[in-house]
Amino acid sequence: MIAGLSTSAVRSTVVIACTVAVLTLLSTSVASSQGVSGTEQQLSALRQQLSALDHRVKELEKTAINVGGQPEAATPDPRIARLEAEVRSLQSEMKAEAASRENQPAQIVAPFVVVDSAGKPILRVTEEGNGFSRGIYVYDSNTLIAGHLGVMQDGTGRVYVTRKGVLPVVVAAATSDGGTLALTSAAGGSNSALKLSVDASGGKVQVFPRGGGSAQAELKATPNGGEFDVYNKQGEAVGWLEATSGGNGKFTIGRAGKIYVEAAVLQNGKGMIIAGPDVGGAPPGLVIPYYLEGRTGH
């Protein structure tokens, strides 16, 4: 029985020793990550419990040796069974903890830069500040920014690509009404060459001159239907085609807020054309017709 007691104690000692070894390996893995995680704290607590158990087993082994062949010491101490159960429970907890850690992604604190074999930056992850927006920057072989995925100051997302570090050639961003996509010329510039966006009425497309400036043409949705506007270099509307509230078409030529030619379909189904320095009446001294309207019949 004494031999059985010693064997049980030895078996528990071996189990604890193996468990300590596993904990040591796990601790080494945990230490390789940044900071002190909850898992490392739990492992530390487990190591303390195992140390206490190991001490208790050693005391039991000494007891078994001291009692010698006395019959009253032949009955194994029930604490051995409890120790083995505790060790098995700790092992199960360690396996569950290890499995949980395998499913957790690694964490890297920004800012940081990924470089190539020559030490040139490939990727930069930054917080806002020092000339950078919050997000990711990608660099070309000349260490110039080629693209960006990040967040603007108002908290909306943005993606843009560039060429040779010039101002964004393509920009896609979120807005309060929806989204926007802007294209610029290869020479860059603060204004877009083409812009597709969404406003309160719906979609809108604007075309800009290559050298920058205000839009020269605009196609958009309105509450009545569609509208196409043409502008001069000063940004004044000189012609526009639109759908009316009655569901008909209307074409207008004007400038600086004045209308000179207007063609439309009336509610009675007749066509109408008005010409003059400004609609609203015949100009003084003008004897030729300024108003032309279609008629029905022959």
Image (tube, rainbow, N blue to C red):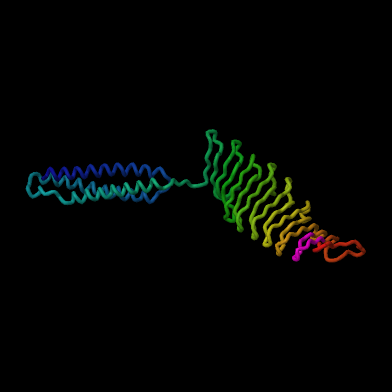
Q: Which residues are magenta?
A: 263-273
Can you say which quadrant of the picture contains the N terminus? top left
Q: Position of residue 298 (x, y in %)?
A: 83, 62
Task: Say which residue appears at 28% left-offset and 44% top-offset.
Answer: 19
Indicate the quadrant where residue 16 lies: top left
Total numbered circles: 0
- Residue 269 occupies quadrant: bottom right
User: For this rendering, which residue is in front, 7 or 167?
Assistant: 167
Which residue is at 68% across, 52% downward?
205
Give left or right: position of 163 versus 280.
left
At a point 15% along the width and 43% down the height, the residue shown is 6
Q: Residue at x 81, y 63 (%)?
A: 297
Q: Nearer the viewer, residue 253 or 149?
A: 253
Q: Does the segment drawn in magenta span residue 223?
A: no
Whole-percent x and y of residue 238? 79, 55
Q: Say whether residue 49 is left or right of residue 209.
A: left
Left or right of residue 267, residue 287 in this image:
right
Q: Hey, which residue is sitting farthest top in the picture?
A: 118
**The one of 176 and 217 positioned closer to us in this rendering:** 217
Q: Is residue 63 left or right of residue 52?
A: left
Q: Residue furthest front?
A: 298
Residue 120 is situated, as x and y percent measured from the top left of the image, at 56, 36
| Residue 271, magenta (yes or no) | yes
Q: Nearer the viewer, residue 69 or 132?
A: 132
Residue 247 drawn above or below residue 47? below
Residue 236: % across, % down = 78, 56
